[in-house]
Image (tube, rainbow, N blue to C red):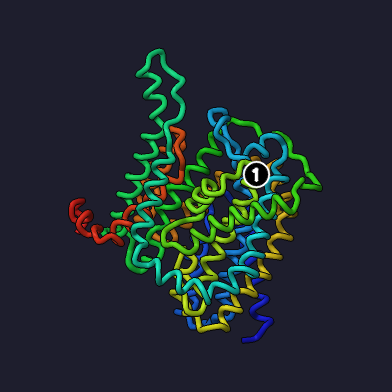
């Protein structure tokens, strides 16, 4: 395999991630699905694109997005006054004029995640993880049910201060919890429908879940930004971050644990892994929390790809690995070292791009406004869903948006939307999925 095409491809993928990272709600897996459709179209037209071009480009796209997607998550995530007591540290930094500092702090965590992948996961994955997978695979469904129980249990009643009577306070306290449970089970029901009776055509079955995810997560975020009346204060550019080696090590431990757990276990996403790691390590420092999110995101998205290429393991975790699996099967140590090299190049380049891209985004927000940027992102993702899945996909998007707005309107966690994956797959792995689908009239 020639070195120059590989380097050119991974750099191109990383640069492409810059374009999709600054738009809120635009997920890298959606873009990868569209890229696969364009690739199939090129192949039908007689063009040939080798794996030495496609695979490094995809790895660069995922790794670069894992680093640079921090920009919209902080700079375009302004909360309204109703969420003043529940905002995340990144949003607090934004509303205090320190959004750039927050982005760079999470970026340092992402860079720590790259180092973990190269120096820790890379050497041990082919040797130890196949054994761990063999030991745990018979109990995967039990582990999933424990995770589901933990997610629902930690959606604890909040509030309880409104209303003149005890019943008023009771309903105020249980409003968010009830919304969280409703979100989880409605999204799980949608997951069963898409798994057993999806309206999406067979030709694009590999993007079956994409419209639902866009509706559950991306569209509510864009709509919230568009209707929010909050004013974002002027942002200051800080040259120092106020972190040291102790903060970085604690962040790497917490984020590496959560992201690594999510990358290894089926269906568990980076958000779930971060929740579990946060409770396990009990980190209260805001800097540690923010940096650990950068570590976790890099470990989950990019680490899942690395485990797909690991000899003797070849785990297919996450949408990126499933998409690449349809294009290329790993061919031993050569592909594994190729993946490690691409991660090193893309991780370093994307971190260097983080500061100028953050400054550009701040300039763009000042010129255009985050509402117009969110509206443009909403239009792009709707057009993308239509281009990939047609009218059926738009219908699924609308249904997913209705479910995804429940936690936004009632103050519960958006993490409950992951019931779309957790519930049907946990039932299938336990051997009861078909019976439940029959009860719902889906088979």
* Quadrant of the snapshot with the C terminus: bottom left
Q: Position of residue 309 (x, y in %)?
A: 52, 75
User: Taking 21 as reference, is 38 left or right?
Assistant: left
Tally the numbered discs.
1
Q: Position of residue 149 (x, y in %)?
A: 37, 47
Q: Is residue 437 visible?
A: yes
The residue beneath circle 1 is 75
Q: Residue furthest bottom?
A: 1
Q: Residues within 10 Å of mark 1 (few under 14, many from 20)?
A: many
* Quadrant of the snapshot with the N terminus: bottom right
Residue at point 41%, 13% (across, down): 164
Compared to residue 68, the image places residue 217 above or below, namely above
Name the secondary structure under disc 1: helix
Compared to residue 387, the image places residue 160 above or below, namely above
* In-front residue for pair 407/282: 282
User: Taking 163 as reference, is 197 left or right?
Assistant: left
Residue at point 51%, 84% (across, down): 331
Residue at point 30%, 49% (across, down): 189
User: Taking 417 as reference, is 234 left or right?
Assistant: right
Q: Is residue 21 visible?
A: no
* In-front residue for pair 370/67: 67
* Quadrant housing residue 117: bottom right
* In-front residue for pair 59/302: 302
Q: Position of residue 376 (x, y in %)?
A: 56, 48
Q: Residue furthest top?
A: 164
User: Taking 416 as reference, is 121 left or right?
Assistant: right
* In-front residue for pair 249/157: 249
């Amino acid at each position: 395999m020639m070195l120059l095409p590989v380097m050119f491809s991974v750099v191109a993928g990383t640069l492409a991630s810059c374009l999709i990272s600054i738009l809120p709600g635009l997920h890298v897996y959606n873009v990868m699905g569209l890229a696969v459709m364009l690739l199939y179209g090129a192949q039908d037209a007689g063009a040939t694109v080798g794996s030495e071009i496609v695979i490094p480009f995809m790895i660069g796209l995922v790794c670069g997005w894992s680093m640079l997607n921090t920009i919209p998550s902080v700079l375009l995530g302004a909360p309204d006054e109703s969420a003043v007591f529940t905002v995340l540290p990144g949003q607090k930094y934004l509303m205090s004029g320190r959004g750039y500092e927050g982005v760079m702090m999470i970026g340092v965590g992402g860079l720590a995640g790259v180092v973990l992948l190269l120096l820790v996961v890379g050497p041990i994955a082919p040797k130890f993880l196949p054994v761990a997978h063999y030991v745990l695979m018979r109990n995967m469904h039990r582990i999933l049910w424990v995770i589901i129980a933990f997610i629902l249990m930690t959606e604890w009643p909040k509030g309880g201060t409104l209303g003149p009577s005890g019943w008023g306070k009771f309903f105020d306290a249980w409003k968010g919890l009830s919304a969280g449970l409703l979100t989880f089970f409605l999204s799980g029901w949608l997951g069963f429908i898409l798994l057993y009776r999806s309206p999406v055509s067979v030709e694009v079955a590999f993007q079956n879940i994409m419209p639902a995810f866009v509706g559950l997560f991306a569209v509510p975020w864009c709509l919230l930004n568009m209707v929010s009346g909050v004013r974002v204060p002027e942002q200051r550019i800080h040259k120092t971050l106020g972190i040291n080696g102790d903060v970085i090590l604690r962040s790497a431990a917490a984020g590496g644990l959560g992201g690594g757990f999510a990358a290894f276990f089926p269906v568990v996403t980076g958000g779930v892994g971060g929740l579990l790691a946060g409770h396990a390590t009990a980190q209260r420092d805001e800097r540690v929390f923010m940096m650990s999110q950068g570590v976790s995101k890099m470990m989950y998205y990019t680490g899942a790809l690395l485990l797909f290429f690991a000899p003797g393991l070849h785990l297919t975790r996450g949408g990126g690995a499933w998409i690449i699996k349809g294009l290329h099967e790993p061919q031993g140590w050569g592909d594994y070292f190729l993946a490690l090299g691409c991660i090193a190049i893309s991780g370093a380049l994307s971190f260097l791009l983080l500061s100028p891209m953050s400054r550009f985004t701040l300039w763009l927000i000042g010129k255009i406004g985050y509402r117009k940027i969110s509206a443009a992102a909403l239009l792009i993702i709707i057009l993308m869903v239509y281009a990939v899945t047609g009218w059926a996909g738009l219908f699924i998007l609308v249904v997913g948006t209705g479910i995804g707005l429940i936690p936004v309107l009632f103050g519960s966690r958006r993490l409950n939307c992951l019931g779309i994956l957790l519930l049907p797959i946990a039932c299938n792995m336990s051997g009861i999925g078909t019976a439940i689908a029959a009860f719902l009239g889906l088979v």
